[in-house]
Amino acid sequence: MFEILKKEWLTREICLMDIYAPNLAQSALPGHFLIVRTHEKGERIPLTVCDYDREKNTVTIVFQVLGESTVLMGEKEVGDTFLDVAGPLGHESELTDLAKLDRNKNYLFVAGGVGTAPVYPQVKWMKEQGIDVDVIIGTRSKDTLILEEEMRREAKNLYVCTDDGSYGIHGRVTDVIRDLVEEEGKSYDEIVAIGPLVMMKFVAQLTKEYGIKTVVSLNPLMIDGTGMCGACRVSIGEDIRFACVDGPEFDGHLVDFDEAMRRQQMYKTEEGRRTLAEIEGDTHHSHSCGCHEEEPVEEKGDRFKRVPIAALDAEIRVKNFEEVCLGYTEEEAIEEANRCLECKNAKCIEGCPVSINIPEFIGNIKRGKFDKAAEVIFEASCFPAICGRVCPQETQCEERCVMGVRGDAIAIGKLEKYVGDYALKNGVEAVKDEEKQEKVAVVGSGPAGLAAASELAKMGYKVRVYEALHEPGGVLTYGIPEFRLPKHSVVEKEIENIKRLGVEIVTNALIGRTFTVDELLEEKGYSAVFIASGAGLPNFMGIPGENSNGVFSANEFLTRVNLMKAHRDDHMTPVKVGEKTVVIGGGNVAMDAARTAARLGSKTHVVYRRSMEELPARLEEVHHAQEEGIIFDILTNPVEIIANEAGWVEAIRCVKMELGEADSSGRRRPVEIPGSEFILETSSVIMAIGTKANELIPNKTEGLEVNRWNCIVTGEDNHMTTKMGVFAGGDAVTGAATVILAMEAGKKAAVEIDTYIKTMRN
């Protein structure tokens, strides 16, 4: 918990707070921002780090009370606490790079309204470096002026202007810039402008006329700050950038401010919630009906037919977020297990990435020894309830099952799910070795990180996991919907089991910002570091209109619903889908996004450029999507997103495709059919075409190499990186892949780390 040590109302609406946040205070720099969450159901609110005190371990924030979330913040008093304060996030100001800082330049800082708060630490920094700067503060009136005295102490010259003339110069900041340059003959080499987007737009237009380099900070676009959601994407010249990852500072002369302002209107959080609700009516939230019925189970068949598994009726489940697959009963699990031949040279084990002894655990199910079945799985994996639900067993262990030659393969995944759920309900846990002295740090609490942490803990190591978000689990928490993978009853419970092994999980810790990898090794005494930061940055197609309002990345859309519970009326994060949604892509993430949009009341299409047979998504997920009314527009490729005059999506221009010769992946390459263009009307678009790795950790870790896809480079047959003592695995190394492959990497890396530490010990 993060205690409020100081609170001061700068105006009737603007509040300053000093918060005790030791890790953040030690690593913050001018230009950074942080995320605040007031309570368990609250939003993640991005705020600039206004100041920091490394001796007192405090950071200072300034916020304007505009809506429900900031009202709750303003009601807190000294001695109260925030649930989460995460950071620092974003890139520090380029002026903090002393090697590149030109002390002979003339600098002007322009602050607008609450933007005075992020300007202040930069001006203070410049004075500490012995550089005099001029500052302009612009605000509506004297009543909304903040930090004047503080800024006056740091600036060489301070110019205050108000729109209404109630204090200082009567006019706007652009009027003052024009007077300083044209009337007073001042010459500036660089201008830094931070404030409302419209202010920065006109400052940039004016300074472009003067030929003055201008840096702007796109803090107003911040949504999450971890690089996952894609909501703060912005056009910078010909490129698409993310304010939270690539910024927040950009060349003001290249920013498409009109587009950015349209996006800002859409992505205001609590301030826009009521307006969104009025516009969207019943489609704003899905009201879970809470009722469900089991499908009738077919009568027992012969040995070569799989025991059917019950699922919620499609017409019922599409109106709620209850888990679709109801799982086997005890009797059904035993009946299905009895089909297993318990092969001595079991091919199914070879197909399992984590090498579970499948015949042994299924044999124990046959005999009703469910505790023993769980213990067998725990020898190889601490996550049977998760893996039993989300692993693509049909292309792994079940594909190797000899029963599949003449009939149906054994339902290995569903049996693993049954054992996993049994273990959670009955307290069956993994066991650990005698405790060792060495400590290991794990970066990221997704599948790879949790797998490595659990294996290392079982070996007796002291393990601490650092997670950037406020909840652990990575893609298990933010990416996979509740109807496929329940969070409270499954994910949270299996993570609790890992904690009982002694694993400590630190949330709101962004490695590369809060701490660096070097600090973990050199200052915090870790013998090794395992990087499992995943691949959370979304890909986009790069087609015209892609930055229109109503276009989401699948990451952003699913994070809002899965992590922030935007579909629930008792949570504050908004989500918008209109009457019709188009999801672009054909993988599991596309299915998750489409089925989620349908549960929010939207008629949903999946647009995929190849055929149904080539959909990369699991057959089970495609089948469930079809049952739930998802429409598949196959052999179709979008070429443009069409927006109305207000910048909101209203249609997609598509072309029909046909399959040509096979490409390098072995699949037939889709080729456009000439003259096949058509319009597909829609009010929302979700891009589900993959993700890529975040560059933050490699950029902040000397000696850590990446490849041309920004994935961390490791040895051909191991997980050791190019930096001594640092290992990596999962999507951060391979690019986006499956949960179980990430767990395989984490498990193997744990063994390698154990060997490395023992070698270093000797």
Image (tube, rainbow, N blue to C red):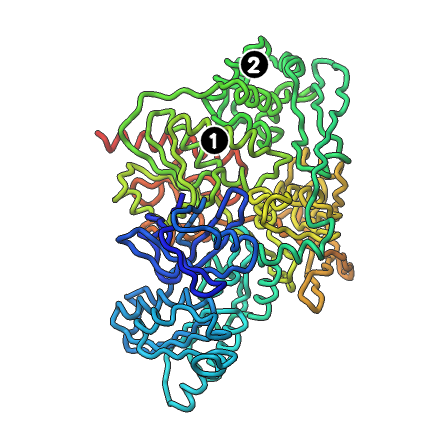
Kind of residue indicated by mark 2 = Cys
> In this rendering, is residue 591 above or below 308?
below
In this view of the protein, which residue sits in the foreground, 570 or 231? 570
Front residue of this view, candidates 672 and 537:
537
State the image quarter where residue 311 is shown: top right
Q: Is residue 183 above or below residue 351?
A: below
- Horizontally, residue 358 falls left or right of residue 595, namely left
Q: Which residue occupies 52% across, 67% down?
A: 236
Q: Earlier in the sequence, mark 2 or mark 1?
A: 2
Residue at (70, 38) in percent of width and height: 288
> Could you tell whether 721 is left or right of 175 in the image?
left
Q: Is 533 displayed left or right of 345 in the figure?
A: left
- Structural distance between the alpha carbons of marks 2 and 1: 32 Å
Query: Which residue in the structure is indicated by mark 2?
Result: 343
Above-or-below relation of 33 to 429:
below
Position of residue 280 measured from the top left corner of the image (x, y, whole percent): 71, 54
Q: Could you tell me residue 747's position as x and y percent?
A: 43, 30
- For the residue marked with disc 1, what is the amino acid? Ile
Viewer-nearest of labels 2 and 1? 1
Residue depicted at x 71% and y 21%: 308
Q: Residue furthest left?
A: 762
Q: Do we see residue 91 in this rendering?
A: no
In the structure shown, which secondary structural element does the residue marked by tag 1 occupy?
A: helix
**Mark 2: few/some/many CA within 10 Å (<14, 14-19, 20+):** few
Disc 1 packing (10 Å; few <14; some 14–19; many ≥20):
some
Q: Quadrant location of the C terminus?
A: top left
Q: Give percent across and percent down for residue 505.
A: 41, 36
Give the image location of residue 61, x and y in percent: 41, 58
Q: Nearer the viewer, residue 460 or 691?
A: 460
Q: Which residue is mark 1?
A: 495
